[in-house]
Amino acid sequence: QKEVEQDPGPLSVPEGAIVSLNCTYSNSAFQYFMWYRQYSRKGPELLMYTYSSGNKEDGRFTAQVDKSSKYISLFIRDSQPSDSATYLCAMGTGNQFYFGTGTSLTVIP
Amino acid sequence: GAGVSQSPRYKVTKRGQDVALRCDPISGHVSLYWYRQALGQGPEFLTYFNYEAQQDKSGLPNDRFSAERPEGSISTLTIQRTEQRDSAMYRCASSRGQGGTGELFFGEGSRLTVL
């Protein structure tokens, strides 16, 4: 079983839609939860970072962590064409960080 | 520097040759990570350093892979006797603090192709 499971998509939505991206994990020791955005032919860039459980909001982006269910989510409100990218969840204990396979998102104008 | 710098950006080599990939982290960043990313996959952990000390090398696939960071700044990932299965994007990332919080800043990567 993989440490982190993420639906690879692809996901295609119209501009302005709410996007929901999710990951599940198996290791209950994970404390750090991140979402990275990766544009084509670029390195991943940190989008959201959460320590332990709870919600975090930054502009149009909201990250949620439910440790009891071992489930994390990223919501994108009012999606824009510039949000088109691959979104990677990542998590770990502070020594190693495990990444999901990434979900490819296209926002259609 | 302004960001994490990796070189070479592209490397094509023949099977059996050794290759060295270089990473120059963001100035002042304590932790440095090496990841390997296959097409359509997320980054896979290889190894990481705090300053010059290699803290965890459990992700290195076999003993042909090694990494060093002798002065706590620039790091080199070396692959000896390359094989075709080593072909991938190799990514370096750095982080401000030691211990790791996941706030990793990635470089553009070095794409290795082994013929």
Image: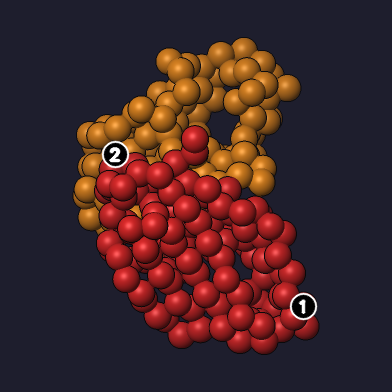
Chain colours: A red, B orange
Residue B71 showing in the rendered view:
no
Within 10 Å of disc 2 (Cα), the crowding (few <14, some 14-19, many 20+) is: many
Q: x%, y% of residue A39?
A: 63, 62
Q: x%, y% of residue B56?
A: 30, 32
**Circle 2 sits in a helix, a strand or a loop, which is it?**
strand
Q: On the image, which quarter does residue B45 sit in?
A: top left
Q: Which residue is mark 2?
A: B49
Residue B59 showing in the rendered view:
yes
Q: Which residue is mark 1?
A: A108
Cα separation between marks 1 and 2:
41 Å
Judging from the image, mark 1 belongs to the subunit labelled A
Q: On the image, which quarter does residue A34 sit in?
A: bottom left
Q: Is residue B23 left or right of residue B87?
A: left
- Quarter in which the C terminus of chain A is drawn: bottom right
In the rendered image of this protein, does residue A38 appear above or below residue A95?
below
Q: x%, y% of residue A61?
A: 48, 78
Q: Residue at x 61, y 86 (%)?
A: A78
Q: Residue at x 56, y 14 (%)?
A: B81
